Image (cartoon, grey):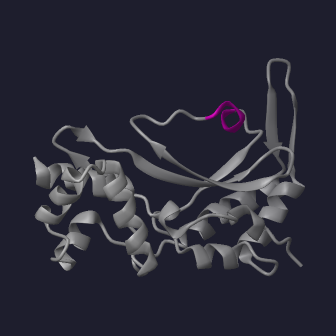
Amino acid sequence: MSTDYTYAIRGLKQRDLCMLGPTTDSGPLPKRVAWLVLQDDGVVSIRAEYQIGTEVTPEPVYHGRWLRWSIPSCTDVDDLSSGLGPEGELSRLLDAVKAGHTSGWDGNNFVGSLTWEAQQASEFLAYAMQGLMTVAEGFRTASDYFAENRDLSRELICSRLQSGQSLKAVAEDLVANAEINGVYLEIWDVAAYFRKILA
C-alpha cells in the first residue's frame, strides 16, 4: 500500500497549475512553474511560483538533497490528487524514491544520493508526471475569455478604473468571478490584456 501524499496539494488551486509563458512587445511575461518536491527530511510538497528569465536552481536541488519533478502545464488538480493518493501511482513511486534517497557530507558539501532502484523510480516518476499533461477544463487565456464574453468591454473596464479601482483590483475581481463559474485565468495575463486594450 502506498503512502497518501495528497496533503502536499492542500490549498492548491487549479489556477496554480495553469502555466503560460507568453511574450509581449516589451519582453517576456513571468511564467508559472510548478514542481513536486521531495526534501531530504522526507517532506513532500508542491511548489508553484513565477519565474522570470533564466531559472536559478536552488542549492538543495543542485546538490541532490532535494529532488523535484516538473508538473506539466495545466495539470488537472483532481488527477494530481488521485496520483498522490494512498493507491496512486505517483505515491508508489515516491515511496520507492524515498526508500533509496540519502544525504551526507562528501568533504565539500552536504549532497544527496540515490540507490539504483531509487534512480529508476525517479525516472519513472518523471515519466508518470508527463502523463498528467492534460489541459484543465475551464482554463482560458485572457484574450480568449474576453472574446467569449463581449459584455466585458473596454468601456466597462475603463469605467471601473475611473471609479478609483486599481488595475490590479479590477483584474483580481475578474479572476475571482471567473473562477466561481469554473473558468481559470492568470491574473498577470488579465492585467497584461488590460494594458494592451487600454494602450
Please name whichever residue, 35 or 63, is drawn nearer the observer in this view of the structure. Answer: 35
Q: At 62% from the left edge and 70% from the top edge, which residue is drawn?
A: 128
Can residue 20 be seen here? no
Say above or below: 107 vs 185.
Answer: above
Q: Main secondary structure of the magenta part?
A: helix
> Furthest-top residue in view?
108
Number of dots carrying numbers: 0
Please name whichever residue, 64 or 19, is drawn nearer the observer in this view of the structure. Answer: 19
Which quadrant would the N terminus be assigned to in this image? bottom right
Horizontal and vertical percent position of residue 64: 73, 39
Q: At 52% from the left edge and 69% from the top edge, which residue is drawn?
A: 14
Please name whichever residue, 53 or 148, is drawn nearer the observer in this view of the structure. Answer: 148
Please name whichever residue, 191 or 5, is drawn nearer the observer in this view of the structure. Answer: 191
Q: At 33% from the left edge and 57% from the top edge, which residue is drawn?
A: 171
Horizontal and vertical percent position of residue 149: 21, 77
> Furthest-front residue in view?
163
Horizontal and vertical percent position of residue 118: 80, 56
Q: At 62% from the left edge and 61% from the top edge, which residue is drawn?
A: 126
103 displayed left or right of 33: right
187 displayed left or right of 28: right
- The magenta stretch spans which residues? 58-62
151 displayed left or right of 81: left
